[in-house]
Amino acid sequence: MARIIGGIGVSHTPTIGYARDRDLRDDPSWRPIFQNFDVVREWLAARQPDVLLVVYNDHVTSFFFDHYSAFTLGVGDLYHVADEGAGARALPAVPGHAGLSRHVARYLTSQEFDLAVFQHKPLDHGCFSPLSMLTLEEGRWTSAIVPLQVGVLQFPIPTARRCYKLGRAVRAAVESYPEDLKVVIAATGGLSHQIHGERAGFNNTEWDLEFLELLERDPERIAELTHAEFARRGGLESVEVIMWLIMRGALTEQVTRVHRGYYLPSMTAIATLILESQQPPLGQEEIAAARTAAARQTATMESIEGTYPFSLESSARAYRLNQFLHALVIPEVRQSFLADPEASFRQAELSESETALIRKRDWLGMIRYGVTFFVLEKLGAVLGISNPQIYAAMKGLSLDAFLRTRRTNIVYSVAARDE
Ligand code: FE
């Protein structure tokens, strides 16, 4: 059974990664950063967590305002380092724990936290800046991660209370995962800083220390604060500290503080914190209830004949093929596909069996493999094959035989024109 063995809070300013990559440990202005992170790193090394659930925010690197979400859970099994403008840091990709992610996604959604999910997106300094200080030993990551991206950059953003409640649900999600895993919840960001406008450079150490104290002893008080109150006290960009409430919510009511560090070198107050739960993990009854809740919505779906629900598992398995077919919405891509299908298969690095599915127009085979119908109709439109033809083929009928089962004989597709 998975268990949350503690929570850490760490700043995620790019400064940390900068100092680590240049090994500025002996420089007096950088030394306190290393000293504080050393304590957290040693604590992690002693506890050896299998997974770090990292609560972070992306800084308009992998997530843009064409589609901005509040809570976005990584469900992949590998996360690369993002290029933020001048090349990516030379760090290895970090493994993700996809099994735990999927369970967390199912449980949280069952509790009405309707998460967005992502895969195949690189992570920026919000995650890798602290991570590279904590779990990278001789070029290898000592723990897998489950990243949880919080959209804190475009208002409206989640309330502090919503984050705290989410943390409670995260606890039940993690502790009801059947595999024996030691999990640490890592919150990142803050503390006080503002990096834009005439107020750039604003800090408030007094508030930072009060925040750390309240987070530990009376998180309800922080959960009450509005974004404007956070901004006034700590600077606008410090509003990201609402993410620390997710970590706090995932621990028990009483916690023991193992470490607290604070250093304000330049623009951002860099805090480090380790908390351990004082109360025991969830009991058997609560765990059983959480597992039932996580499975309930889809539990009997598999037994409906001729039905293939599109799940996180199918999405991961058939990602490449779905991506290939989805790209047919781009005019140049479909032109090159029609001109030389074999070359476009090679370019997309489709496997032999994936290629065969498209070559044979094996619509049902693609569905069974994990392709969503809504890219099949795009392929149909590109090839001049109507939707009813695809339905008929999946049912093993001729088009005429299929149309006889309908009230009308209409034939259509998602193509804009009929030529
Ligand atoms: Fe940030």
Image (tube, grey):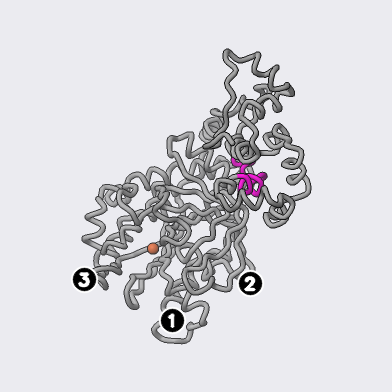
Farthest-out residue, bottom: 27
Residue 193 position in % (x across, y down): 30, 67
Which segment did they paint magenta? 311-325
Number of the front mark, 3 or 1: 3
Q: Is residue 316 magenta?
A: yes
Residue named by callout 2: 139
Quadrant showing the C terminus: top right
Residue in the image at 52% along x and 65% along y: 82
Q: Residue at x 51, y 34 (%)?
A: 286
Mark 3 Cα-neighbour bin, 10 Å: few <14, some 14–19, many ≥20: few
Quadrant of the rendered image holding ligand 1: bottom left
- Where on the picture, by quarter, is residue 392? top right
Q: Quadrant of the N terminus?
A: top right
Q: Classify mark 2: residues with Cα within 10 Å, few (<14), some (14-19) or many (20+).
A: few
Q: Report if residue 262 is visible in the image.
A: yes
Callout 3, which amino acid? Glu
Viewer-proximal residue among 380 and 156: 380
In the figure, 234 relative to 341: above or below?
below
Picture coordinates of residue 201 (x, y %)? 26, 73
**Residue placed under numbered mark 3 in the picture:** 198
Indicate yes or no: mark 2 CB to ligand 1 under 8 Å: no
